[in-house]
Image: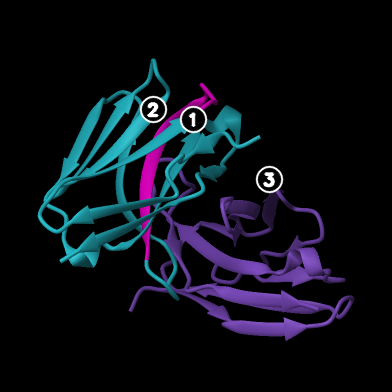
Chain colours: A purple, B cyan
Amino acid sequence: EAQVTQNPRYLITVTGKKLTVTCSQNMNHEYMSWYRQDPGLGLRQIYYSMNVEVTDKGDVPEGYKVSRKEKRNFPLILESPSPNQTSLYFCASSLWGIANSPLHFGNGTRLTVT
Amino acid sequence: DQQVKQNSPSLSVQEGRISILNCDYTNSMFDYFLWYKKYPAEGPTFLISISSIKDKNEDGRFTVFLNKSAKHLSLHIVPSQPGDSAVYFCAASGNKAAGNKLTFGGGTRVLVKP
């Protein structure tokens, strides 16, 4: 089944403790991206990657890192999480960028930072 | 400053009637627009899209209208069904010069009453 898989689905952590949220897609998509969803703000893009080893900042990259060493994987790294990063996170992929190529989303990771 | 706005956070409609969801944007560089639907505990799924060279796109019960001069688009669902109850996000992207980003609105929660 074609899908985007995120892990974990739920994560509770404390301020400053490094964490990684994994994302994997099995559709051989070139483009991958991370979003966070907050009430009233919709989904805001954190980082995106057009291809392996190519990443770029989205609208809210502060406090996050990403890497794209393989086409299928695009982990999101929070080196020193803070409470304002408590949010619902979505990974997404598309065949070749977002122009005329709809995104496929994972089921989300709910992160709570205390 | 939100470049894509959905001014109605919620909408309630009777089964069988029309649902009209509205979306306004401010960035004239946007040239491709999409609607996503999201159920609880799932990621958004692509619903329908429209390019700026068109003013209407139809797919079954779903029709998207684009008014470029007003920087406004709308999604019509006819007839509405209980399974359409979800959060709907409007999204917009620009050409390569604008970056490969997808900007989302804040979402409209639709409730279709049987």
Q: Is residue A104 above or below residue B24?
A: below
Q: Residues within 10 Å of mark 1 (few under 14, many from 20)?
A: many
Q: Nearer the viewer, mark 3 or mark 2?
A: 2
Q: Where does the image place residue B3, in percent across and percent down from the top left? A: 57, 34
Work out whether disc 3 and disc 1 sit on a shared chain.
no
Q: Is residue B80 above or below residue B98?
A: below
Q: Main secondary structure of the magenta part?
A: strand
Question: Circles 3 and 1: CB distance less than 8 Å?
Answer: no
Q: Which residue is mark 3?
A: A59
Q: Nearer the viewer, residue B26 or B14?
A: B14
Q: CA distance from mark 3 to mark 2?
A: 22 Å
Circle nearer the N terminus (2, 1):
1
Q: Is residue A97 magenta?
A: no
* Quarter of the rendering occupied by the N terminus of chain A: bottom left
Question: Circles 2 and 1: CB distance less than 8 Å?
Answer: yes
Magenta region: which residues?
B25-38
Q: Nearer the viewer, mark 3 or mark 1?
A: 1
Q: Residues within 10 Å of mark 3 (few under 14, many from 20)?
A: few
Q: Which residue is mark 1?
A: B25
Q: In the image, what residue type sits under mark 3?
A: Asp
Q: Is residue B35 magenta?
A: yes
Q: In the image, what residue type sits under mark 2?
A: His
Q: Which residue is mark 2?
A: B72
Q: Nearer the viewer, residue B48 or B4?
A: B4
Q: In the image, what residue type sits under mark 1?
A: Tyr
- Tell me the residue at 66%/71% (across/down): A75
Q: Secondary structure at mark 3?
A: loop
